[in-house]
Amino acid sequence: GENVEQHPSTLSVQEGDSAVIKCTYSDSASNYFPWYKQELGKGPQLIIDIRSNVGEKKDQRIAVTLNKTAKHFSLHITETQPEDSAVYFCAANSPSGGYNKLIFGAGTRLAVHP
Amino acid sequence: GAVVSQHPSRVICKSGTSVKIECRSLDFQATTMFWYRQFPKQSLMLMATSNEGSKATYEQGVEKDKFLINHASLTLSTLTVTSAHPEDSSFYICSAPGQGYNSPLHFGNGTRLTVT
């Protein structure tokens, strides 16, 4: 089945700097890659997603890139702010389970220091 | 936007009792919902897929007799942890895809279960 690896596990940056989180997946048939932000004690919130027919997607300070050949995708946050501090999860869909059956990475704890 | 509501947000129960967690899609219908489990500082592990009007599909290693799932309507799925033990203490989160083709998955705010 699908396996998703995520790095780094923790990331500390200064306010205004950029943050990059990287993920790799194992199943070349996966075609949907969302990113979720989880704050303490809450459920994950979708922040951006990308489908396999697109190489890059941007939404204000957040961008995601996808390299299907290498089977990896990355989240880029520019001009980080303290409120960006949270745990970020990447995910890939399990092709055998349909579009919404997601397998998650281990998560990255991002700390943005003022 | 699509809102998934989960209840209760926290529950404490004694070992051996059963606990029911509800997951509702508030402004849309969901024929499929997903239940995840998350241990502290760990990732979300998919437990099962809840299917409206039919049996749930469980992931490998998840005991279907212990984690009973019922998807009674297009807006409600329930997870019952039966004969709970301390090792069942965890954060349980449900999710549902929004309306429309290829809609993203929306998550509830989770239920913190503590078994004493």
Image: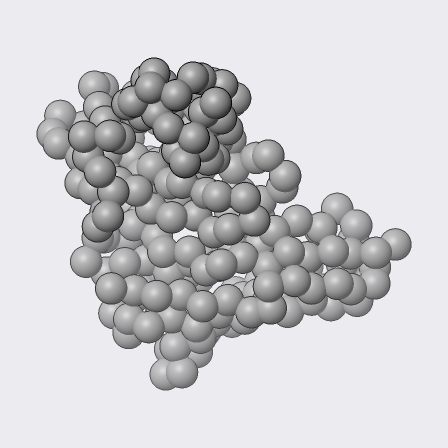
Residue A85 visible in this rendered orientation of the protein: yes
**Colour setup of the view:** one colour
Q: In the rendering, at what x and y percent does residue B72 appear?
A: 21, 19
Residue at 51 percent of width and 51 percent of height: B42
B35 left or right of B39 in image:
left
B65 left or right of A70 in image:
left
Q: In the rendering, at what x and y percent does residue A74 appear?
A: 53, 70
Q: Quadrant of residue A70?
A: bottom left
Residue at 18 percent of width and 30 percent of height: B65
- Nearest the viewer among B47 and A71 is B47
User: Looking at the image, how many numbered discs can be counted on the residues?
Assistant: 0
Residue B80 visible in this rendered orientation of the protein: no
Residue at 19 percent of width and 58 percent of height: A96
> Farthest residue toward the left?
B54
> Farthest residue toward the right?
A114
Q: In the rendering, at what x and y percent does residue A86 appear?
A: 66, 49
Above or below residue B44? Residue B27 is above
Residue at 46 percent of width and 35 percent of height: B90
Q: Quadrant of residue B94?
A: top left
Q: In the rendering, at what x and y percent does residue A57 appear?
A: 52, 65
Above or below residue B47? Residue A92 is below
A12 left or right of A109 in image:
right
Above or below residue A107? Residue B78 is above
